[in-house]
Amino acid sequence: MPHPSTSPLAVRPVAFQRRTLAAPLSVLMALAGAPASAASPFEGRYQGRGEGQLALQVFALDDGSDAHFVLAETALMNQCTGDLRGLARPSGPMTLVLRKTEPGAEETCTLTLRFSADRARARMEERDCSTYHGAACAFDGSLKRR
C-alpha cells in the first residue's frame, strides 16, 4: 500500500478544490449575463459616515431593466447595526430609490441614493426604515466611492 503522502488522493483534493471553486465563479458570471466591462455608472462600493459608519454596494442587473441590487449597511459602535438590501430603480437623474415593505408592516421603507455627477460620491437618505436597524442607527449620510 503506498504511503499516504505519495497517494494520488493526497494530491487530488487541491486540484479538485481549484476546479470546484472556478466552476461556481464561471456559473455566477454566466448568470450575471454581462461582460465585466459593461458596468453601470452607479455600480461600485461606497463608504462614509452619518450617525455611524455607512457602507453601500450597488450592482447592475444587466437584464435590460435599469434596476440595481443595493446593499446598504449602517453601524454605530456598541449601539446598533443594520442592513437593507433589495432592488433599487432610477428616480430622476443620478438617483436610485429602493422601496421595501415587510409583510404585515404599515409603512414602506424608502432608501434614496443620490450620486454626484462624477459618481465619486453618494448621499444616502432613508424614510421609515427603522425596521432594518437599531434606534441609534440610520441609513443617512455621505459616502465616497472606494
Image (cartoon, rainbow, N blue to C red):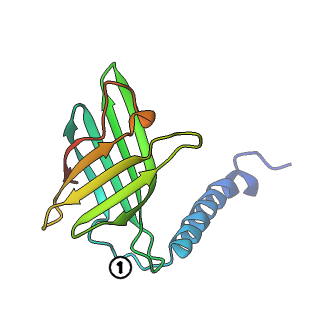
Q: 121 or 107, which lies in front?
A: 107
Mark 1 closeness class: few <14, some 14–19, many ≥20 residues within 10 Å: few
Residue picked out by circle 1? 38
* Residue for point 42% across, 53% down: 99
Outermost residue on the top side: it is 78
Outermost residue on the front side: it is 106
Q: Quadrant of the C terminus?
A: bottom left
**Residue 30 against residue 140 in the figure, above or below:** below
| Residue 2 appears left or right of 94 | right
Q: 46 or 103, which lies in front?
A: 103
Q: 56 or 12, which lies in front?
A: 56
| Residue 53 appears left or right of 83 | left
| Residue 67 appears left or right of 92 | right
Count of number-bearing discs: 1
Q: Position of residue 33 (x, y in %)?
A: 50, 78
**Residue 96 against residue 141 in the figure, above or below:** below
**Residue 33 against residue 71 in the figure, above or below:** below
**Residue 105 against residue 121 in the figure, above or below:** above
